[in-house]
Amino acid sequence: MASLLFGLALAAPHAQTPLAGSEVLLPAYAAALVVIELVTGALLLALFSVHRILAVMLLAAAYLFSGLMAVPWALTFPGVFDAMGLPPAGPQTTASIAAVRRLGFALLLLTYAVLACRQTRRAAPRYSGMVIAACILAVFAAAAGLAVLIIRNDALLPRFMMDAATITVNWTYFAVLVAAVYAATLAILLLRGWSVLDLWLTVVTFSLLIDILMLSFISEGLRLSLGWWAGRLYGLVAAMVVLLVLLAQTTALSAQLTRAVAAERRAREARLLSMQALSASIAHEVNQPLASMVTNADAGLRWLARNPPDLAETRAALERIGREGLRAGRIIDGIRAIFRKGGQERAALDLNRLLQAVLTRCEAEARPHGVTLELRLGERLPPVSGSAAQLEQVVSNLATNAFEAMSGIKGRPLVLRITSHAAPEGEVQVSFADTGHGVAEEQRRHIFEPFFTTKPEGTGMGLMYCQSILEAHGGRLWVEDNVPHGAIFHFALPAAPGAAAPRDIAA
Ligand code: ADP
């Protein structure tokens, strides 16, 4: 606002200097004004269609009305469009159109300020399209009707102009009225809490106030004088301010929208990936008990087909099927708990007992591979807090991987040595050292990724699943080379809170 006042101070001393021949600039000025005001009106209507605040629609109507009225104003301006052969307008026509345009805009702006200040009456969503259409129609009808009325009835109009260039005292009274409306609008806008739009409307109103002062008083109402043109320039600045603010806001909004859409797409892809991971890990983990159930069902049938049927063996096979079924159910629960995040049932667990239980089951699996299992469990292991079903899965996965890594290897002892010990940092560490083919350097970075596998029948989910479980328990999983052959998979889990400090390290 200070710069607006500075401009006023600069122009004031020369305000009455006439700029002869400057009417050639008028069409360019009018065209700019019409385009800027109509675009501003359209953007404000777009804003209304989003927020549906009626006050914003009134502001849009103000800009549309002002933009439309600028057309007959320019067309009737004396000496500008004569070459086009338009019938000459009466001496009061242009000034009266200007008066109606200015008063209409000022009153609508004042109504906006009053309404927006009272806070937001909103149109119902389904009516907003109709409200916009009605607003555009009403403004068009008002502008066209008033323009025709003024042009046809020059003799009845109040006398604003003495001749083609000089105003009468009537215009001065009118200017005082418009300035008073602007001053009231300015006061309301200054007093209330501002939105960004209101803040800039204050600047707009202030420049329009200077515009009317320049036009009517400082230039002594002399058309096409320096002060008159300076007033026009303020009018143009006023028209541009809201347009620029709206454009900046629209750009910021569309950038925000683009970012939101991209984030939503990323979230959807992540959800899809986690669904793929979930289904692949269910398949991976449940295959094992299912295979065992099928084997036991075959065995049961064979025991039954004997003559006489071996009922004791059949019962044992059925019991194993039942146990494997329950295990499959527990596995599925465990997988669901991982993806539920934070929903796992935790209990204090003795990892040594868990290792023994799982590895007893694994012995049958080790035998066909010709693998010897060695269990070296540390004493006085502190308990860990976790889900038994999930940690059993980790142990059984790591053991199965080790058996598969040793399968087909000849000429050296095939051993899976499992050790547990209490690590000094309040952790319990378990290691699976095998004498298999080991993990190649270039594969080491990928083996924990979902779907990475080097096995023809592999799913590449096992290690990813183990890692997710251990990390969800606050632990970690890593791999090292075994010397001279094979790999060692280590995992560490934090001791349960309040557990006794470890005093023993395993052999
Ligand atoms: P899958 O067993 O279905 O291949 P995993 O995620 O369990 O999926 O394992 C990924 C890959 O890590 C395996 O294909 C294998 O190449 C490698 N790997 C896992 N465990 C061992 C091991 N004990 N020794 C050597 N390589 C292993």
Image: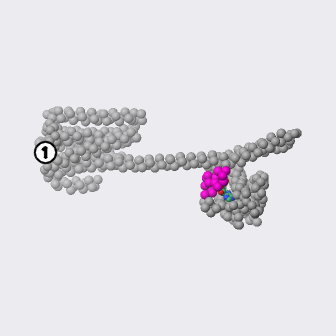
For the C terminus, which image quadrant? Answer: bottom right
Circle 1: residue type: Ala
Rendering quarter of residue 118: top left
Give the quarter the ligand 1 occupies: bottom right
Q: Front-most of 194 and 307?
A: 307
Q: Is residue 314 magenta?
A: no
Residue at (30, 49) in percent of width and height? 241
**Residue at x 78%, y 52% (from the top left corner):** 364
Q: Position of residue 187 (x, y in %)?
A: 30, 46
What are the residue bounds of the magenta stretch?
446-461
Residue 14, located in which quarter of the rendered image? bottom left
User: In this rendering, is residue 384 above or below 152?
Assistant: below
Q: Which residue is mark 1?
A: 165
Q: Is residue 306 visible?
A: yes
62 and 352: which is toward the camera: 352
Q: Decide: few, some or many residues near mark 1? Use Cα within 10 Å; few <14, some 14-19, many ≥20.
A: few
Q: Is residue 301 left or right of residue 345?
A: right
Magenta region, main secondary structure:
loop
The location of residue 498, given as percent across then percent down, is: 70, 58
Q: How many marks?
A: 1
Helix, strand or loop under label 1: loop
